[in-house]
Image (cartoon, rainbow, N blue to C red):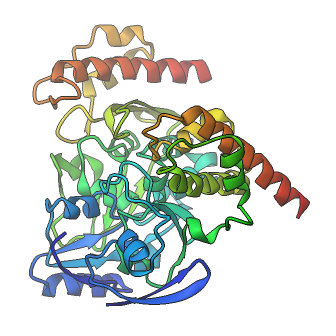
């Protein structure tokens, strides 16, 4: 790992001003991607600004008014998976958080760090897309449709800090994942949620970043059955193709996992 | 940078470069070589220690991130004469072959038991296997490891009830 200057600010403002003054800085959240990347010299910031001292970025709450669930960006995956509020109000978030990586990673890795990184195979992005999330930074709100842009690319500017994410509470939802057995990442992951305003299908792992599968949503809005998905074509244009799975196979998985999600939801109702 | 860590109950002040990993401080500066480096790429879990009560891979944590934190290593949970119940269970169940992964397995297993107790969740064989996904044993001795964790968990929970 190359050398760098380390800072642990105690407020958002001081984090931002440290960032503005440094030559080539990066923010550090749980570090579960960044530190291994720095060890491999794939990342070499001049300054590492550790956000873990910002207590206001921690925690889970239910918002008055629209009744959404707000999760602080620095909340680690296991704190979401074990949150009594999440388990009662939005258990699919616990399902997603509990499926990430392994237990040690879930003890350190954070929601904000994961989505800011926008790894194409990360789990959280499917949940944000399926649950109509809003991403809050230090000074603005970003709808999830505008957030995930491309491979490791989001609507965030380099100096932006994710503060919290709001999730809509659907009538019902489930996450189905084809887990890479070694890394724990999603080869493909599909989150299907039934909201008052219709079905949402969030897909991760298949493309360069998470996306809505609108054709699948249309079919399921017409008929919430596995058979309804048979007629839908999931084109693999632009899908990821690597040693783990071809684009064609990932396209197949999108459909298989969507069917499993529908079957799961139908069996619960 | 000076870092103060409460290590196995004792405050330790160490002088480290910002890019020093926690595991290297433990092993090389503080001489606690029970925490192993298996892969150094966050895959194997041999370097698992407790940071503020939770299992983490110390090859993926900077020493400076542990400033002010409580760190517990395999040396801090028991001794040769007075084994921790989870260590005793690994011995009783022959939950190891070469033993290289064992410190990480035990630290992770203790985290699992603590977590299950605080959540009142059952720790059955599936939950143990899910919980050990971040720990790799290259001797492939998982059957006995799972049995050892189950036995250690039962002993810790009867101890907790008796207390």
Position in image of residue B132 (x %, y %): 53, 44
Counting the numbered discs, the total is: 0
Say whether residue B34 is left or right of residue A255: right
State which quadrant residue B150 falls in: top right
**Going 34% across and 59% down the picture, which residue do you hit?**
A32
Position in image of residue A59 (x %, y %): 52, 66
Q: Residue furthest right?
A: B162
Q: Quadrant of the N terminus of chain B?
A: bottom left
Say whether residue B127 is left or right of residue A144: right
A68 is higher (above) or lower (below) than A265: below
Position in image of residue A263 (x %, y %): 50, 17
Q: Nearer the viewer, residue B62 or B139?
A: B139
Say whether residue A94 is left or right of residue A147: right
Position in image of residue B55 (x %, y %): 52, 60
Is residue B53 visible to us here?
no
Is residue B163 visible to us here?
yes
State which quadrant residue B87 falls in: bottom right
Q: Nearer the viewer, residue B57 or B65?
A: B57
**Going 45% across and 19% down the picture, which residue do you hit?**
A260
Q: Quadrant of the C terminus of chain B?
A: bottom right
**Going 29% across and 49% down the picture, which residue do you hit?**
A144
A192 is higher (above) or lower (below) than B94: above
State which quadrant residue B37 falls in: bottom left
Q: Nearer the viewer, residue A96 or B59?
A: B59
Say whether residue A169 is left or right of residue A187: right
**Going 15% across and 46% down the picture, which residue do you hit?**
A151
């Amino acid at each position: 790992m190359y050398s760098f200057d380390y800072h642990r600010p105690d407020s958002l403002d001081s984090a931002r001003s440290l960032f503005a003054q440094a030559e080539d800085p990066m923010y550090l959240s749980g570090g579960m991607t960044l530190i291994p990347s720095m060890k491999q010299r794939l990342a070499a910031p001049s300054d590492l600004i550790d956000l873990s001292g910002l207590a206001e970025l921690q925690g889970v709450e239910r918002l008055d008014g629209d009744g959404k669930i707000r999760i602080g960006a620095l909340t680690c995956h296991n704190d979401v998976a074990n949150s009594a509020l999440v388990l009662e109000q939005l258990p699919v978030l616990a399902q997603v958080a509990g499926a990430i990586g392994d237990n040690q990673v879930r003890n350190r890795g954070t929601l904000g760090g994961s989505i800011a990184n926008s790894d194409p195979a990360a789990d959280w992005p499917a949940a944000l897309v399926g649950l109509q999330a809003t991403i809050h930074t230090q000074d603005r709100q970003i709808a999830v449709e505008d957030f995930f842009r491309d491979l490791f690319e989001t609507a965030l500017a380099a100096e932006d800090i994710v503060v919290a994410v709001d999730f809509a509470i659907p009538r019902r939802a489930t996450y189905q994942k084809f887990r890479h057995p070694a890394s724990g990442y999603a080869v493909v992951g599909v989150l299907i949620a039934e909201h008052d305003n219709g079905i949402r299908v969030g897909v991760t792992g298949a493309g360069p970043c998470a996306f809505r599968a609108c054709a699948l949503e249309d079919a399921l809005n017409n008929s919430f059955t596995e058979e309804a998905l048979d007629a839908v074509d999931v084109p693999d244009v632009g899908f990821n193709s690597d040693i783990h799975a071809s684009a064609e196979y990932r396209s197949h998985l999108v459909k298989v996992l969507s069917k499993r999600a529908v079957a799961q939801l139908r069996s619960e109702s | 940078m000076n870092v103060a860590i409460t290590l196995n109950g004792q405050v330790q002040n160490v002088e480290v470069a910002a890019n020093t990993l926690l595991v290297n401080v433990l092993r090389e500066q503080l001489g606690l070589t029970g925490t192993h480096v298996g892969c150094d790429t966050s895959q194997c879990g041999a370097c698992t220690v407790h940071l503020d009560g939770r299992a983490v891979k110390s090859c993926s944590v900077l020493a400076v991130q542990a400033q002010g934190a409580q760190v517990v290593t395999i040396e801090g949970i028991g001794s040769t004469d007075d084994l921790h119940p989870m260590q005793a269970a690994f011995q009783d169940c022959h939950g190891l072959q070469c033993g290289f992964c064992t410190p990480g397995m035990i630290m992770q297993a203790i985290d699992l038991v603590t977590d299950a107790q605080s959540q009142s969740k059952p720790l059955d064989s599936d939950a143990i296997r899910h919980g050990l996904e971040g720990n790799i044993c290259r001797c492939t001795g998982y059957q006995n490891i799972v049995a050892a964790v189950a036995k250690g968990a039962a002993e810790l929970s009867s101890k907790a009830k008796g207390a």
